[in-house]
Amino acid sequence: MTMADDEQRVTVLLVDDEENILKSLQRLLIDEDFNIETATCGEAALEKLQTLENVGLIVSDQRMPGMNGAEFLGRSREFIPHAQRILLTGYSDINATIEAINKGGAGRYLSKPWDDDELTSAIRDAVELYRQDVEKRRLNVIITQQKEELEAWNTGLKKRLLQTTATIREQSQAIKSLDEKNLPIILSRTFDNFFEVMGDRSAVHARTVSILVTDVARKMNLDAETVGTFRLAALLHDTGKFGSLSHTHQKHQEDMSESELNDYRQHPGRGEEMFSKVEELAGILPLIRSHHEAFDGSGFPDKLVGEAIPLGARLIAIADYLEKSAHSVDRNRADYALMSAKYRGGLLLDPQLIPMFQAITKIVYFEGRKAATVAEVEIGPTELISGMTISRDVESSSGVLLMQKGSVLDVAGIALIRSHYRKSPPLHGIFVQILED
């Protein structure tokens, strides 16, 4: 055992005025995975507590000269408030037991003479409870720090973004006098530089979606001003997420709680609001607001259907879906993303627009593979879509066959797999087949 390992071991403090009892307890616990310290009275134990580290449990006798067990346990909380406590009592005194529980924080009491197995089990359980509490408090500190860092990051980011938009009016007046049609393109470059400075996952997503949308808009022979508007809207489509202090946007919607989902569904409106005061950005507002509308009307925030959804928003929805799908796998990204998008055609996405993204998606996610070959990707249960073909047997963590290789997924099959993965996730995802074009 290294010194580092020894420092992590929990210390158990045994307190009893009879030396033979302390020795008996030490022998009983000699093979346990924690350090043992002893004291023969409450006063001596309190002195020890000021020097000992990582004391996770006190086992104290109730009847001791001077300070009794209940009083000692109560005072010990000043030094080690998070430790577990067990009271040993050798006589029938219910009042002392109640005092030890109410004032001393004792979690359990045992009668003397004790049963060795019962006492050992109680001590093990108490030490494990302490270890779990230590880990819980450690994680809470990390979560609090991360929340504070995220809040500071979001506040700073939102401020920088608003500062960027605040300069647009002044800059755009000079730009308009030169070439008003180039305004969306010039604004796109301004915000593109902003996202490049960000350099995180959100920035990569925004810029990739913008590349995909811009390429398709040009192929559709839209005028330069419209292409610039679509490009800018694609770049800024998720800025409403900066108004949230949670990590909900990093989760799949099926994994969100109701409150997280409600917060997530507000980000298109928040994004629209962020730029609503800038006259020069009026053209991007309906595209930002509507990029989560679904072709079948099941989207948000306005439940728009089909071509009632602005064209730019429909393009952003496809690009957004492609980028997230490609990012969810390690290889065959372009083929997997395009296949998944096709399965969403007519439901989430405009089926007529999806084929237009094929060439640019293969360029963005080029991997140098041979064409016309059968391949597979490993995905998580939340990425499953009806119509996908299973390329390997799907088994639960206990080895139960859930779905055979070659099976085509339907709603029932997806529900079965997701249920097992939620309860006891295997070490790997689900392998599905893709056919490269």
Image (cartoon, helix red, strand yellow):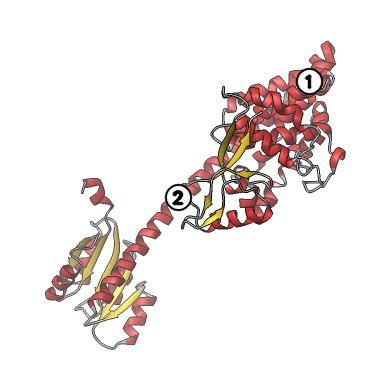
Query: Which part of the image, by quadrant, shows the C terminus?
Result: top right
For residue 35, what is the image quadrant? bottom left
Name the residue: 23% across, 84% down.
90
Name the residue: 23% across, 80% down.
114
Q: Nearer the viewer, residue 85 or 293?
A: 293
> Which residue in the rendered view is the most extreme toward the left?
20
Q: How many marks?
A: 2
**Image position, residue 119 (x, y; %):** 26, 74
For residue 50, what is the image quadrant? bottom left
Question: Looking at the picture, which amino acid does disc 1 mark?
Answer: Arg
For the residues marked 1 and 2, what is the alpha-carbon distance in whole angstroms?
Answer: 50 Å
Residue 303 lies left or right of residue 72; in this view the side is: right
Chain-order first, disc 1 or disc 2: 2
Q: What secondary structure is found at the residue carrying circle 2?
A: helix
Q: What secondary structure is found at the residue carrying circle 1?
A: helix
Please tell me the numbered disc located at residue 398. Answer: none
Name the residue: 74% across, 33% down.
316
> Which residue in the rendered view is the most extreme toward the right?
308
Q: Nearer the viewer, residue 411 or 324?
A: 411
Q: Which residue is mark 2?
A: 141
* 310 over 83 or under it: above or below: above
Q: Which residue is mark 1?
A: 218
* 107 over 295 or under it: above or below: below
Q: Report whether residue 389 is seen.
A: yes
**Image position, residue 251 (x, y; %):** 60, 45
